[in-house]
Amino acid sequence: MPDFEEIASTDEFGSLDRLEVFVDDVPVLLIRLNDQYLAIEDVCTHDGQPLTAGCIENGEIVCPRHGARFDLLTGKALCMPATKPIQTFEIEVRDSKIFARPRD
């Protein structure tokens, strides 16, 4: 399993609920939900567009382009037009630093 990579600091969020970062050169959307941090690949599997501006509702992100929904924990595609999951990342917070690595 790959090592954890430092990707951000909790201080970078301020009033934001998401940050655009990279893990091993992969565009990743780092999301803060209350006190939890989640990370997903920032690319819709339907058409390759970023999920960055997507609405976050009930533990899901909605693709701003065509409305595909993905589970933030598992990456599972929840509705059409997406049929393939997105990559998710394991997160560790150490002090105020946020580390990530791809899930298997």
Image (cartoon, helix red, strand yellow):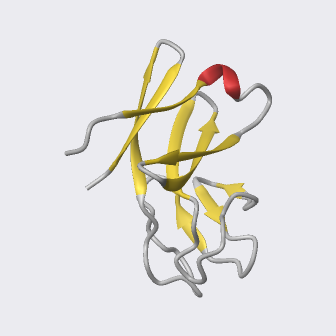
Residue 88 appears at what percent x and percent y?
42, 55
What residue is shown at x 67% (from left), y 42% (from top)? Answer: 19
When asked about the image quadrant of residue 52, the answer is bottom right
Which residue ends up furthest to the front in the rendered image?
Answer: 25
Query: Of residues 4 and 25, which is closer to you in this image?
Result: 25
Which residue ends up furthest to the left in the rendered image?
Answer: 1
Residue 17 appears at what percent x and percent y?
71, 39
Total marks drawn? 0
When asked about the image quadrant of residue 6, the answer is top left
Query: Of residues 54 and 9, which is closer to you in this image?
Result: 9
- In what quadrant of the picture does the N terminus appear? top left
What residue is shown at x 25% (from left), y 43% (from top)? Answer: 2
Instruction: Locate residue 4 relative to residue 21 in the image: left or right.
Output: left
Residue 95 appears at what percent x and percent y?
48, 12
Instruction: Locate residue 10 relative to residue 91 in the image: left or right.
Output: right
Location of residue 33 with respect to 55 vertically, above or below: above
Location of residue 94 with respect to 83 vertically, above or below: above
Which residue ends up furthest to the bottom in the rendered image?
Answer: 81
What residue is shown at x 62% (from left), y 38% (from top)? Answer: 33
- In what quadrant of the picture does the C terminus appear? bottom left
What residue is shown at x 42% (from left), y 61% (from top)? Answer: 87
Query: Of residues 6 and 51, which is closer to you in this image?
Result: 6
Which residue ends up furthest to the right in the rendered image?
Answer: 15
